[in-house]
Amino acid sequence: MNIAFFRTRYSRVIPALALVLFALSMSMVSCSNNEEQKEDKTIIEGSIQNPTHSKISFCTYPDTVSLYLGAKQAVYTVDLDAQGHFKFAIDNKTPVVFDLESGEQTLATNLIVLPGSHLEIKFTGKENRPNIVSSGEASEFNGFLIELLDSFYESPSLKQEYYIGTNYMDIHYFSDYLDKRRQAETGLYNSYFEGKTINKVYEEYAKNTIDYCWGADKLYYLWKKRMKIENIHGDSAYFSFQTKPFIQNAGAINCPSYIRYLNLYIKDYYERLVETGALPKVKGEKLIPDVEKFMLAHELLDSTFRDIALYNIYFGDTHDLAKGAVQDSLRGRSLDSLKASFCRKYNLTMIN
């Protein structure tokens, strides 16, 4: 998405933990390959062997709305030179999760850099597969993230199993499949960094990526079964991970799979209430799903976690607009203002 970068101030104060990693008060600076760089800037550079487009974009979350919606945006775009080289110099004060995109192709996704890091990535072969050629902690950790994706999600056979094969698994077989995948992913991490001490930010990001992909996939499986009108229900063992510390994890807000998980959690909770007859509360009453999820977000979640769910509910409630227009309609407005509009629309009593 080539959407211009800009900042927005919100009248609602976001808790400090949510902003430690993602209040991106950063300025983006593009540089030609022969310019000198200050050592305190984060440098992301590399080359594309077979470019399909003349430009490359650095995509991240420019504001809180984008973060809570899990919607990265192209905050800076540079031209590739004649040899396919590119360079970004980023004056970031906090860790940044990012993608690199060129044209319609996402070259690398959900990588993370700390302030002052240096990454050099070469994209080679017909599919422009990423290969980190620089050294250092940031390079090693992002190399792990690329290997994690390749090893468990990207190969044709794994894609076939993950996207198609799992549709035909019963819930017990699928749960076992996910547990084994999670164990294997954790094993890859442990072997990759055996005997090494890595930055706590990287350590938590790896653990959260693995854990919340696992949790989100459990909930997404149930959603797919409901869409097919299949009568599938998880038992207490299937939902054993649904503890408050897992659901409301301030240290995971920087993790894309956590944002996905939290929104699936609200959706799944709502669907299970409908399935068990707990909703509608008045028999025969017409349900408005977004209103019920709005109420559940206030009932089940605290502070920042509730805000994440609410932004996504408001996003879903404006389904008559194109996605980019929806984001623009939310950006620049405080959560309280959006909540007031939602309550007026559905004639609800304002909830604090």
Image: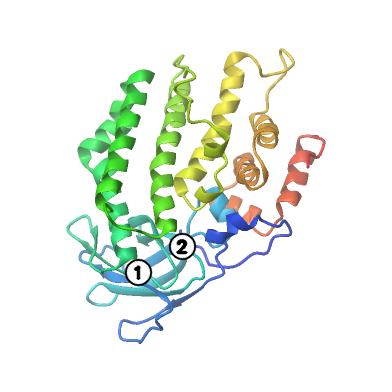
What is the three-letter code of the residue carrying label 2?
A: Val
Q: In the image shown, does 222 or 325 lie closer to the viewer?
A: 222
Q: Quadrant of the C terminus?
A: top right
Q: CA distance from mark 2 to mark 1?
A: 21 Å
Q: Secondary structure at mark 2?
A: strand
Image quarter for residue 23? bottom right
Image quarter for residue 266? top right
Q: Residue at x 54, y 28 (%)?
A: 268
Q: Check disc 1: other Cα within 10 Å, few if <14, some if 14-19, many if 20+.
A: some
Q: Check disc 2: other Cα within 10 Å, few if <14, some if 14-19, many if 20+.
A: many
262 left or right of 205 in image: right
Residue that label 2 marks = 96
Upstream in the sequence, badge 2 or badge 1?
A: 1
Q: Is residue 275 above or below residue 300?
A: above
Q: Residue at x 47, y 24 (%)?
A: 227
Q: Secondary structure at mark 1?
A: strand
Q: Is residue 193 above or below residue 75?
A: above
Tags 2 and 1 in contact by the CB under 8 Å rule? no
Q: Is residue 186 above or below residue 109?
A: above
Q: Residue at x 48, y 56 (%)?
A: 72
- x and y percent of residue 278 in the render? 66, 17
What is the three-letter code of the residue carrying label 1?
A: Lys
What mark, if any, has residue 69 been given in the picture? none
Residue that label 1 marks = 55
Q: Residue furthest left?
A: 125
Q: Residue at x 23, y 67 (%)?
A: 133
Q: Residue furthest front?
A: 195
